[in-house]
Amino acid sequence: MRASKPWIALVLCAGLSACGNTVGKQALYGAGAGVLGAAVLQGSVVGGAVLGAAGNVLYCQQRGGCR
């Protein structure tokens, strides 16, 4: 059974909720999730990396740090 692209993207974007201990790790984890999501959706891999990194850093910083 093949998973549809939106479901795969949703699972990959769940990786954005994974925070690191430092801003660098947060950016790295987010960029990885963004690259994978963009590759699955056949979008811009560079754009996915940038948006993923920025999104994860903002998410982690807004929560007051990850626990």
Image (cartoon, rainbow, N blue to C red):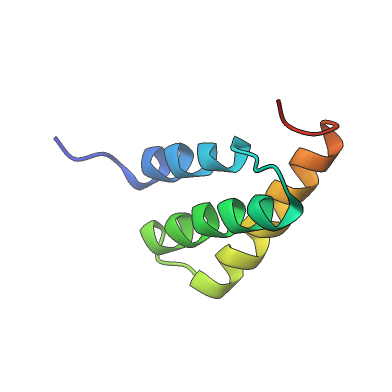
Q: Position of residue 15 (x, y in %)?
A: 52, 41
Q: Residue at x 35, y 47 (%)?
A: 5
Measured along the vertical axis of the image, is residue 38 above or below residue 6?
below
- Give the quadrant of residue 42: bottom left
Observer-nearest of 66 and 51 = 66
Measured along the vertical axis of the image, is residue 61 above or below residue 54?
above
Extreme top residue here? 67
- Give the quadrant of residue 61: top right
Q: Position of residue 51 (x, y in %)?
A: 66, 60
Is residue 16 shown left or right of residue 54? left
Q: Residue at x 65, y 66 (%)?
A: 50
- Quarter containing the C terminus: top right
Q: Residue at x 40, y 63 (%)?
A: 39
Q: Position of residue 48 (x, y in %)?
A: 56, 64
Q: Residue at x 69, y 47 (%)?
A: 56
Is residue 38 shown left or right of residue 16? left
Measured along the vertical axis of the image, is residue 39 above or below residue 60?
below
Q: Is residue 44 visible?
A: no
Q: How many marks?
A: 0
- Give the quadrant of residue 11: top left
Q: Is residue 16 visible?
A: yes
- Quarter containing the N terminus: top left
Extreme left residue here? 1
Observer-nearest of 4 and 50 = 50
Extreme front residue here? 21
